[in-house]
Amino acid sequence: MLGMSNVSPSASGTPMAASPLTRAVLEIDDYSAGLGWDQPARLFALVDTARLRAQEPGLAAQLGLDDSESTATLTPVEQDEIPATTPLDEFLGTVAWPDAVVGCALTVERLMLPPSAETAVPQGLNESQLAKWVAEHPDRQEVRMTVAVLRDGARESALRLREKDSATEVLTGSTLVPGLAEALAATFEA
C-alpha cells in the first residue's frame, strides 16, 4: 500500500496492517519513534515468531513473545550497533545472516529535498559538499526511513517526517526507498 497509513491502531497503539512485513516495519518505526530523533542507524533481523518460540523458548520469553499475546508472525530483533565511522553501504556489505533469519530491516535518518529542489543542485560538488548544501537548503526535510526485506524478495518501507512526527502520518509502501531495499536484499545473497 502506497500513501498515507490510515490503518486503525491496535490495542498496543501500533497500527494494524495487512501483511506481517508491513506490521514489522511499523513496529520498528514505532520503536524508533519512541527513542526520539537524531539516532544512529539500527539494523534488525526478522525472525519467524512461531519458529523462534519453538526453537528458542528462552529467547522468545526474554523478548516477551508469549503464545497467548503475540499475533505477530515476524519478530524484529535489534542487532549490535552499526559503527558510526563505517559508511552504511560498506557495513551492509559485511553482513551475512544465519538461515533462521527470514528477513532484515534497517532504520536510518536522512535529510531529503523535495523534487522541485533537484534542478537547483549545483554541479560538481563532492559528497561532503553536497551533504552540506542539502543541510543548509531551506526546503530540507528530516526523515526516518525504515526499510525491510525478506529472503523471498518481499519489501516494505515506512517514512516518517520529523515535522509530521505522528504514527498517523507515516507513509508506507514497498517502493519508497528502492536503493536501500536493494542493499538489504544483497545481505542475503552471500
Image (cartoon, helix red, strand yellow):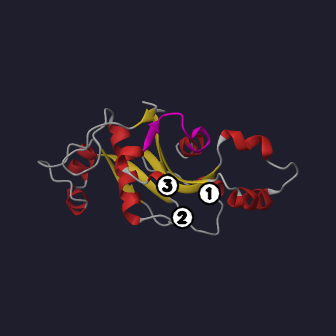
Q: In which quarter of the image is the N terminus?
A: top left
Q: Which of 51 and 183 is in front in this view?
A: 183
Using the rendered view, name the quadrant where residue 7 is placed.
top left
Instruction: From the top left corner, tell me how far across and down residue 23 is, in percent.
Output: 33, 42
Spatial separation of the CA atoms under disc 1 and disc 2: 8 Å
Of callouts 2 and 3, the N-terminal one: 2
In this view, 2 is above or below 118: above
Amino acid at circle 3: Glu
Spatial separation of the CA atoms under disc 2 and disc 3: 26 Å
Q: Can residue 150 be seen in this view?
A: no
Mark 2: secondary structure: loop
Which mark's residue is nearer the viewer, 1 or 3? Answer: 3
Task: Write the start and end of the magenta stretch as one range.
Answer: 170-180
Amino acid at circle 1: Leu
Instruction: From the top left corner, tell me how far across and down residue 74 is, in percent.
Output: 32, 44
Residue beneath label 3, please?
163
Residue beneath label 2, please?
82
Amino acid at circle 2: Ile
Q: Are marks 1 and 2 in contact (CB under 8 Å)?
A: yes
Q: Are marks 2 and 3 in contact (CB under 8 Å)?
A: no
Tell me which residue sits at (43%, 61%) in the image.
Answer: 79
Q: How crowded is mark 2: few (under 14 residues within 10 Å), some or many (20 or more)?
A: some
Instruction: From the top left corner, tell me how far across and down residue 19 is, in percent.
Output: 33, 33
Of callouts 1 and 3, the N-terminal one: 1
Q: Residue furthest left?
A: 68
Tell me which residue sits at (38%, 51%) in the image.
Answer: 166
Q: In which quarter of the image is the C terminus?
A: top right
Of callouts 1 and 2, the N-terminal one: 2
Using the rendered view, name the quadrant where residue 60 is placed.
bottom left
